[in-house]
Image (tube, helix red, strand yellow):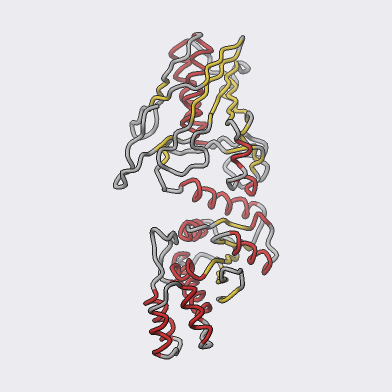
Amino acid sequence: MTTADRAEGTGLRSGWTTGACATAATTAAYTALLTGEFPDPVTIDLPKDRHPSFALAVERLEDGAATAGVVKDAGDDPDVTHGALVSVRITPGEPGSGVTFRAGDGVGTVTKPGLPLPVGEPAINPMPRQFMREHVAAVAARHGGTGDVVVEVSVEHGAELARRTWNPRLGILGGLSILGTTGVVVPYSCSAWIDSIRRGVDVARAAGRAHVAACTGSTSERVAVETYGLPEDALLDMGDFAGAVLKYLRRHPVERLTMAGGIGKLAKLADGHLDLHSGRSQVSTDSLAAMVEGAGGSPGLADRVRAANTALDALQQCQADGLPLGDLVAAGARRTALGVLRGAPVAVDVLVIDRAGTVVGRA
């Protein structure tokens, strides 16, 4: 398989999306259906003048059908589908039908509105569909085909892998989604996670949810459910990507947003950071000490907070002195959120929790 470029400035190896792998398998299978021979490796055309080649892991020619498979290489990205076998079975379609997509084993089906595909469709996203249609047309032109085909995409162990993704919550059942807008996986861009946040907002809006909760993890999600009684499709697995949630809601608002998380991550949001990952932003005890001073805390308490090892340590110092640092952090996080929303019609409240899931601050 051709290796994608090193991601700019990181030295990390880029990889290929499931959509690119499915496009390569489609190209090889349709070529074999028309010619009796599988091109191996098979080369495809992607945006930005990329022309990667993929080795085939599966080649199967039957009477009236051809199947090709490619093992996904996600490069240095910790992608759940890295190493998965993506296969496509091509059969002739009805005359004039063009390309028809079907979900094979391990590929999900859309069951809820709000996604970029109608309910009942295979979870093969619009851009991979476009790539596959274009390559089917090119193979047909090259080898005298009609371009009327059924493309059935499968991912080995896809149903099991999908349980580690957002798909069940989004109403994509039975397997994975076939994703990718450029065909390239940029290491640690977390584009799939951010795309899932956006689709989560879309599904909540389509379901008529007026209140959603963006949570940093499972404990804060449980607290939000217990506090507000929210249904599953109103929960957004924000993780570290506060900015992704807020920027998407700015363009696609809901009436109310609750942001819930541990004091460490929300202290970073209060300090203006929109990426809350420990490798990309740090808790500033100087900022926490300034909050203490602004709230009338003693100079001694401010000094202890400034010298604290963690935000939780600072919280405990303040609790001992009766100063509500959790509320101050919540208020700061809310101010940051409202600043990113830029006047969008979204009411915001914040829940700050400790490691045990106790609410230690609200705004």
Foreground residue among 301 and 68 = 301
Measured from the top left, where is residue 273 in percent x and y? 41, 65
Give the percent coordinates (x, y) of residue 168.
64, 46
Q: Residue at x 44, y 37 (%)?
A: 74
Q: Residue at x 61, y 15 (%)?
A: 95
Q: Is residue 181 above or below residue 275?
A: above
Is 351 on the left or on the right of 311, as rendered?
right
Q: Who's the residue at 50% across and 76% down the image?
A: 331
Looking at the picture, tell me which residue is in the foreground, 85 or 294: 85
Q: Is residue 216 above or below residue 270?
A: above
Q: Where's the N terminus, which quadrant? A: top left
Q: Is residue 20 above or below residue 147?
A: below
Locate the C terminus and report the quarter of the image it occupies.
bottom right
Q: Residue furthest left?
A: 9
**Residue occupying image coordinates x 51% and y 28%:** 22
The percent position of residue 5, horizontal first and vertical second, equals: 33, 36
